[in-house]
Amino acid sequence: MVLAHPRLLPALAVALAACGGGSPEPAAPTANPAPVELPKDRMAGQKVYDARGNEQSCAPPDRGCTPEEAPLAFRDECRLAGFRLMQCGCAMVCTGRPGGGKVAYDAQNTEKPCPPEQKDCSPPDTSAAFQDACTESGHKFKVCGCTWLCSGKLKQPVSASPPAP
């Protein structure tokens, strides 16, 4: 029989106590746990754009399919324009119009193409009412080609002439 040194007995007692000496009883499982709810897809029904630039409504991701691979140029345009790529149904789509928003709106709320700004052109002045309507609608005023346009739809079109008193 091996005897421990009297100075080691307290350390040995602490080490044995730290090991727990016994195992605690496992917690009893709860009866009928609540089912885990999957979060609802916030993008379901929202406007998204496919690689051809066609607007569509976003369907919830289909877990039963592998999403089709989006072309590299489309993925780059989408991300560079500040949007996200995501899966809607089985397709990869962009949350905004790819290509940096190639349409804009005039004072009468008519959709116009928005080519890049022309370097050799100074756009003509436009009314303060149009500028204010664009800003109040939450959009930006920008030059498309050689014309000032609004980056989004106005809440109300701007009349061409002020109303008569």
Image: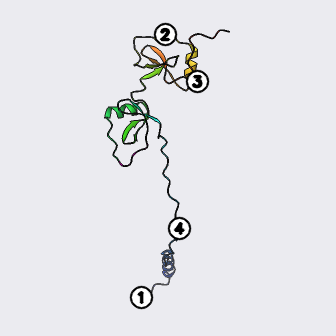
Provide the residue designation for mark 1.
Answer: 2
Q: How many marks?
A: 4
**Amino acid found under the numbered disc labelled 3:** Glu
Dot 1 alpha-carbon crowd within 10 angstroms: few under 14, some 14 to 19, many 20 or more: few
Residue 142 percent across, percent down from the top left: 48, 20
Q: Tell me what residue is drawn at x 45 percent, y 85 percent.
A: 4
Identify the secondary structure beneath mark 2: loop
Q: Which mark is nearer the camera, 2 or 1?
A: 2
**Amino acid found under the numbered disc labelled 4:** Ala
Identify the secondary structure beneath mark 3: helix
Quick check: is 62 in the magenta stretch? Answer: yes
Residue 37 percent across, percent down from the top left: 50, 53
Left or right placement of residue 35 versus residue 77 in this view: right
Q: Earlier in the sequence, mark 2 or mark 1?
A: 1
In the depicted structure, whether residue 99 falls above or below residue 40: above
Residue 136 circle label: 3
Left or right placement of residue 143 versus residue 77 in this view: right
Residue 124 circle label: 2
Q: Which residues are magenta?
A: 59-64
What separation in Å lies between label 3 and label 2 (alpha carbons)?
22 Å
What separation in Å lies between label 4 and label 2 (alpha carbons)?
74 Å
Q: Earlier in the sequence, mark 1 or mark 4?
A: 1
Q: Which mark is nearer the camera, 3 or 4?
A: 4
Provide the residue designation for mark 4.
Answer: 31
Identify the secondary structure beneath mark 4: loop
Identify the secondary structure beneath mark 1: loop
Q: Majority secondary structure of the magenta segment?
A: loop
What separation in Å lies between label 2 and label 1 (alpha carbons)?
103 Å
Q: Quadrant of the N terminus?
A: bottom left
